[in-house]
Image (cartoon, rainbow, N blue to C red):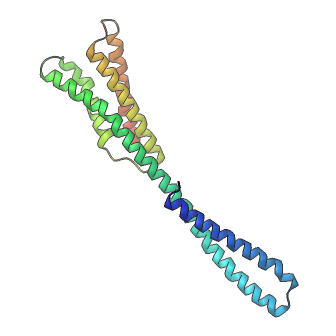
Amino acid sequence: MTTPAEDQRDHVMARASALRRELRAGLAQLPDQADDERTRTLDALVERAEALLRTEKEVDAAVEQVRLARLEAKRGKAQRTTLYLAVAPVAVGMVSGAMMLFGALNPIWLLLALPLLGAGLRIAFGPLGPTPLMVSRRQRAAYSGALAAILTAVALIGTGPTAQPIVVILAALATVATAAFLVLEAR
């Protein structure tokens, strides 16, 4: 299935190809013609060459439109993906905040929950940049935010006295990585 931009590009490229063929055919006829006829043919060839130049500019514009349409489609897909992935950090941040509010968790967990919540909100609702590099950085931030949320949830549930400090450190590192990706995206 082709997009309208691709259809426009194909149409303009076909028109340019037809003009090139006409130009070549006219050039091939020149040696066999008389002087008056040759002058008229050269005038027609100059007009075709000008039309070909205009068409080539249209081809370049159409190719750029196709590139922009593909980038926009990729941005839309990335925006949906990051929105879905941002649910995990926001949910874990909100649940851990509620657990702290009701006294089930120590307030020290705020050091992990608040940056995770902030990163999740930034991933979900922050504007997505126009360049492919910004899109890929946002996707990396979303994936690392989801990983940080999973590790934080595992640490909150409790994995045992020996494994919990390791999981907490991994969750903190994943949260820092998420924040770093978001900072890099903003630059």
Dividing the picture into quarters, in which one does residue 8 lie? bottom right
Judged left or right of residue 97, residue 22 is right
Of all residues, the one furthest to the top in this rendering is 161
Judged left or right of residue 41, residue 73 is left
Front residue of this view, candidates 130 and 149: 149
Dividing the picture into quarters, in which one does residue 27 lie? bottom right
Report whether residue 172 is seen: yes
Query: Which residue is at 59% across, 63% downward?
Result: 10
Front residue of this view, candidates 84 and 126: 84
Dividing the picture into quarters, in which one does residue 34 lie? bottom right
Report whether residue 187 is seen: no
Percent coordinates x, y for residue 119 in the rendering: 31, 34
Front residue of this view, candidates 126 and 182: 126
Tag count: 0
Percent coordinates x, y for residue 134 in the rendering: 43, 44
Of all residues, the one furthest to the bottom in this rendering is 36
Of all residues, the one furthest to the right in this rendering is 32
Q: Is residue 151 above or below residue 17?
A: above
Query: Which residue is at 30% across, 39% downward?
Result: 122
Query: Which residue is at 64% across, 67% downward?
Result: 14
